[in-house]
Image (spheres, grey):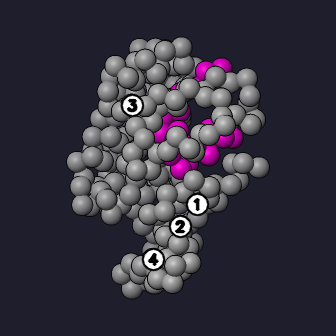
Amino acid sequence: MKLLVTGGAGFIGSNFVHYLCGKYPDYQIVVLDKLTYAGHKENLSGLNVELIVGDICDPEVVNRAMTGVDVVVHFAAETHVDRSIMGPEAFIQTNIIGTQVLLQHALSHKVGLFHHVSTDEVFGALSLNRPDLKFTEETRYDPHSPYSAAKAASDHLVRAWHETYGLPVTITNTSNNYGPYHDPEKLIPRFITNLLSGQKVPLMGKGENVRDWWIIAELLI
């Protein structure tokens, strides 16, 4: 089995690669990562994987990375909401165009499964006054930021490539994760590092925001 993991040097992607290497040591794993501020070679230290440094928007790089691959697990994305507000162009380019490039090459290489890692933010927000409400696979898309809008668009592309071209796909819409290799700009690492250094923690709005969290360490068990 040969897998291509895009964004595999990032936070969630590298945890997934560690899990694969531990549970399925016979798998051949290729990691394609641009190594931006959120992706680091050190996250893959000690693992027997092939690392290709490149952009998922580059067809030549993607074609090389996709050669002989059975399964694609697509983590690569611009992910920070605040960054998307300040500069949406990179989110549109990577999350939408990059996903389209991957889908097209997955199709041409006859990949057996394309798994797309998305976010629950494509569904918008739940009311604090209705704790009974939950997101499901049937929830209407209602993105509230350039980040979530770009991820919603990539979800639609993945489904379109399945319906139009027959590409086998799956999609997961995860909530917020925390754990090893988490970038220090994210909420929980920032709170921890600020408190350790005697600084105040950042307060968003009136402090009434609610998030669901999933500890990524579960992957390592």
* First-in-chain label (3 vs 4): 3
Image x and y of residue 107, in percent = 43, 18
Image x and y of residue 149, in percent = 32, 52
Q: Are marks 2 and 1 in contact (CB under 8 Å)?
A: yes
Q: CA distance from mark 4 to mark 2?
A: 17 Å
User: Which label was assigned to residue 209?
Assistant: 4
* Mark 3, secondary structure of its residue: loop
Image x and y of residue 219, in percent = 69, 48
Q: CA distance from mark 1 to mark 4?
A: 17 Å
User: Badge 2 local density, few (<14 within 10 Å), some, or many (20+)?
Assistant: some
Residue 129 appears anywhere in the view:
no
Figure check: 48 above or below 185: above
Quadrant where the image shows the N terminus:
top right
Q: Which residues are magenta?
A: 1-19
Q: Is residue 169 left or right of residue 140?
A: right
User: Which label was assigned to residue 189?
Assistant: 2
